[in-house]
Amino acid sequence: QVQLQESGPGLVKPSQTLSLTCIVFGDSITTKNYYWNWIRQPPGKGLEWMGSIGYDGSTYDNPSLKSHTSISRDTSKNQFSLQLRSVTPEDTAVYYCASSYTALGPGDADFGSWGQGALVTVSS
């Protein structure tokens, strides 16, 4: 079973770009049929699937966030990343990375392994 670990800033100012990275241990991110997801949970709210990148580099977006997010990968480092542009205080959340064996979408919850989560606060 793979292990995932998020890293990123704890505090971001409004209008800036939030960048998070998830490093994967235990298997290659290019292994067939793996998908690598970003999910967040704002304080007091439920989980929100943000998007994913597949083993073949294909990306999948949440339509409600598509204009603000980018997901990429660095296969040499076995990691994938999330960029969230023009953040506002409403983007304050715990951000998780997680694996799955299918390409998921908004509302799906069939995740495999999860990272421990990274709290990001958007505040001036």
Image (cartoon, rainbow, N blue to C red):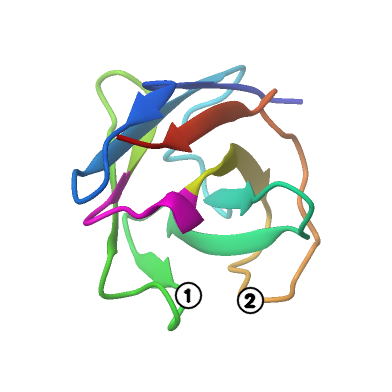
Q: Do the residues bearing badges 1 and 2 touch, measured as CB atoms within 8 Å? A: yes
Q: Which residue is mark 2?
A: 106
Q: Is residue 28 magenta?
A: no
List the single residue furthest toward the front.
124
> Element at badge 2?
loop
Tell me the residue at 61%/63% (across/down).
49
Placement of 95 over or under 60, stated as above or below? above
Quarter of the image with the N terminus is: top right
Instruction: Please indicate, yes or no, whether residue 35 appears anywhere in the rendered image.
Output: no
Is 67 situated left or right of 78 in this image? left
Amino acid at circle 1: Asn
The amino acid sitting under disc 2 is Pro
Dividing the picture into quadrants, the one containing residue 27 is top right
Asked if residue 101 is positioned above or below residue 102 in the image, the reply reads: above
Q: Which mark is residue 97?
A: none
Q: Secondary structure at mark 1?
A: loop
Q: Residue 115 at what x, y percent from top left?
A: 66, 27
Q: In the image, which residues are magenta?
A: 83-91
Which of 28 and 43 lies nearest the eye of the viewer?
Answer: 43
> Which residue, given by chain and number where applicable, does mark 1 sit on?
62
**Which residue does the image show at 60% across and 51% down from the upper left?**
39
Up-down relation of residue 57 to residue 114 (above or below): below
Question: Is residue 124 toward the left or the right of residue 62 in the image?
Answer: left
Location of residue 28 in the rendering, given as x and y in whole percent from the top left corner: 48, 28
**Picture layout, residue 13 above or below residue 25:** below
